[in-house]
Image: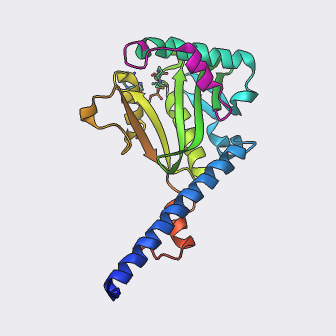
Amino acid sequence: MGKKTTASANKSKEKRQARKVEQRRIADGMSYVNSANKLQDLSSFCKELLVYKGNDLEVDMYIQRASQLEKPILEWAIDLTERNMKKLYETCAWGWNKERKVEEMTDDLAWYLIAKDKNGTPLAFSHFRFDMDFGEPVLYCYEVQVEAGGRRRGLGQRVLRVLEKLAQSTRMRFVRLTALTHNAGAAAFFRACGYSLDETSPALEDAAHYEILSKATVPEDGNDALSDSMKAVNVNPAQS
Ligand SMILES: CC(C)(COP(=O)(O)OP(=O)(O)OC[C@H]1O[C@@H](n2cnc3c(N)ncnc32)[C@H](O)[C@@H]1OP(=O)(O)O)[C@@H](O)C(=O)NCCC(=O)NCCS
């Protein structure tokens, strides 16, 4: 055992610092997720986006936790998901298991964006969650479902814009989602809305029947979770 050289001491210091930044980044991410999940009113972050008028549609949206949804709305959301997705699930390894889907959709952590037309008829919804995913705070979009009669009028895109604004306001680093590769309409939709293959998506050679797509959040104040973590442990990003 010899004495450490200055170079190797510096290397160890860098490694320790990198570990600290990583730990801090994850701790910060978890605290953003916990804070987002404790919020009472998400609508205040995106009020201006919750009214959608265009292409012969007049839509009002609201956001609630699964536990706050009126029973008929929850039942409609489950029914729409079944109408839109059952066949697609049945034609891949997942299969359709209604019980499991209902369990997922009624989870305590599930949030809902509900869109209704001016007569109060529900037209679209998204089930989303704030969660840690591969060590990062993300807004995970579990579903975006639009009634057949309301499609190709920009409503799906508006729903995603609301999620993106919520992700920005709550410091989630991405809006991330899982899409079936044989759902061609959805693939075209997500790409048209600026989503691309996420680094956590299974490798092509794994021939998975799904892919992970995401869109990075533009930080509201120019600072992202990573640079905050660096500041917190006194690391100058320019030097690291
Ligand atoms: C996918 C879905 C959510 C899109 O909603 P939508 O309200 O019709 O989408 P928008 O009108 O906002 O579309 C925005 C753009 O996405 C693209 N797009 C949307 N649907 C598309 C489709 N079926 N085929 C090709 N491109 C499509 C287009 O570029 C469109 O712009 P354009 O109409 O000006 O050409 C809707 O078709 C749906 O609910 N499908 C069944 C459920 C589903 O597959 N959900 C996604 C997986 S959870």
Q: Depth check: give the residue in front, 210 or 71.
A: 210
Residue 103 drawn in magenta:
yes
Query: In the figure, is residue 218 to the left or right of 194?
Result: right
Q: Residue 181 location in percent, x, y? A: 34, 26
Give me the residue at 50% from left, 69% from top: 230
Q: Is residue 78 visible?
A: yes
Q: Quadrant of residue 208?
A: top left
- Quarter placement of the C terminus: bottom left
Give me the residue at 68% from left, 44% from top: 37
Assign ligand 1 to one image quadrant: top left
- Quarter placement of the N terminus: bottom left
Q: Depth check: give the residue in front, 51 or 180.
A: 180
Q: Residue 28 location in percent, x, y? A: 59, 59
Above or below — where is 152 with respect to 232?
A: above
Give me the residue at 52% from left, 27% from top: 144
Q: Residue 77 location in percent, x, y? A: 62, 19
Q: Residue 35 location in percent, x, y? A: 68, 50
**Magenta region, residue range:** 90-110
Q: Quadrant of residue 80?
A: top right
Q: Depth check: give the residue in front, 193 or 88.
A: 88
Residue 237 drawn in magenta:
no
Query: In the figure, is residue 81 to the left or right of 58?
Result: left
Above or below — where is 193 with respect to 45?
A: above
